[in-house]
Image (cartoon, grey):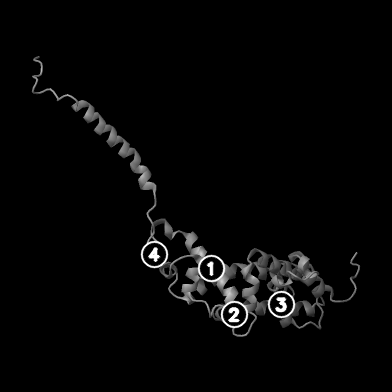
């Protein structure tokens, strides 16, 4: 084998320069994944990629509930909901084309589960009105504590005249559930289990007034030296005691 001629040999320093280029290329390749992991700044508009996750949609629903409770449904626009959630208007329009569509989603996903949780008391205790009323009162208070927007929204949009939420729920579901509850109370009255002087149609409204209304106005008690120490359990206990025993002295049930 003949040795390479001097013309074929690499010039002095070429090997070191080639090695340097290889090392530089390796360093760039090592840095490439880190650069790829850095998220690009999101442009305003519709969400893309992982930004379409359910957390954004839930955040918009939470913002809508907060605004509806604070200022009412009629006075709340989709743009206001987007600002409350910290999103662009395009983001909220990506998920909800109109406010009515958003309201229907809220009814299906937020209100119906709460309604089912509260309304199951009569079905769970068909022969025990005291247990049913107790469960119903405590259920209302629990729902209000777990969902701080609930009391104010209920007062503003359900039991007040012109409430859009009440109208919307009536259009979709009617009064079948409410009528069933009234029929149960009337049956208890016929069986002698419930005071015959009670007006069945006012029982549920009375219970709301004893539970949801105090919770909706609880922020006004902060400077009240007597009521500011009341807890949700105190409100539920008072509601049950007043409905079950009235103002008469407590009877010995032993």
* N-term mark: 3 or 2: 2
Q: Earlier in the sequence, mark 2 or mark 4?
A: 4
Secondary structure found at label 3: helix
Q: Which residue is mark 3?
A: 204
- Quadrant of image for the N terminus: top left
SS category of the residue bearing label 4: loop
Residue 140 placement, left or right of 97: right
Q: Quadrant of residue 98?
A: bottom left
Instruction: Give the image location of residue 82, x and y in percent.
Output: 47, 69
Extreme residue in the front direction: 12
Q: Residues within 10 Å of mark 1 (few under 14, many from 20)?
A: some
> Along the polypeptide, which appears first: circle 3 or circle 4?
4
Q: CA distance from mark 2 to mark 4?
A: 35 Å
Q: Which mark is residue 50?
A: none
* Mark pair 3, 4: CA separation: 47 Å
Q: Residue at x 48, y 62 (%)?
A: 56
Residue furthest toward the top? 1
Nearer the observer, 182 or 141: 141
Q: Which residue is mark 1?
A: 63
> Is residue 3 in sight in this rendering?
yes
Q: Which residue is mark 4?
A: 44
- Numbered disc in front, either 3 or 2: 2
Q: Secondary structure at mark 2?
A: helix
Q: Nearer the viewer, mark 1 or mark 2?
A: 1
CA gap, disc 1 to disc 4?
A: 19 Å
Could you tell me which secondary element the residue under label 1 belongs to?
helix
User: Which is nearer the eye, 8 or 134?
Assistant: 8
Q: Is residue 26 left or right of residue 136?
A: left
Q: Nearer the viewer, mark 1 or mark 3?
A: 1
Q: Are marks 3 and 4 in contact (CB under 8 Å)?
A: no
Task: Give the labeled residue for mark 2.
Answer: 166
């Amino acid at each position: 084998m003949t040795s390479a001629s001097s013309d074929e040999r690499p010039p002095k320093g070429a090997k070191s320069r080639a090695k340097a280029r290889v090392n530089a290329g390796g360093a760039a390749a090592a840095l490439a994944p880190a650069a790829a992991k850095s998220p690009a700044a999101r442009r305003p508009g519709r969400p893309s990629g992982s930004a379409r996750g359910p957390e954004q949609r839930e955040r918009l629903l939470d913002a809508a509930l907060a605004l509806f409770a604070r200022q009412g449904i009629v006075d709340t626009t989709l743009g206001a909901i987007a600002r409350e959630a910290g999103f662009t208007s395009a983001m909220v329009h990506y998920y909800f084309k109109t406010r009515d569509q958003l309201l229907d989603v809220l009814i299906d996903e937020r209100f119906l589960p709460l309604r089912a949780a509260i309304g199951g008391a009569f079905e769970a205790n068909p022969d025990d009105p005291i247990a049913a009323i107790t469960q119903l009162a405590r259920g209302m208070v629990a729902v209000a504590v777990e969902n701080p927007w609930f009391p104010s929204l209920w007062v503003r949009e359900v039991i007040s005249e012109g409430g859009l939420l009440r109208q919307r729920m009536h259009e979709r579901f009617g009064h079948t559930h409410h009528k069933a509850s009234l029929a149960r109370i009337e049956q208890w009255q016929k069986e002698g289990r419930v005071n015959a002087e009670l007006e069945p149609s006012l029982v549920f409204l009375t219970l709301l007034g004893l539970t949801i209304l105090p919770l909706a106005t609880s922020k006004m008690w902060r400077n009240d030296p007597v009521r500011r120490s009341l807890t949700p359990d105190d409100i539920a206990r008072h509601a049950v005691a007043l409905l079950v025993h009235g103002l008469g002295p407590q009877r010995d049930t032993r």
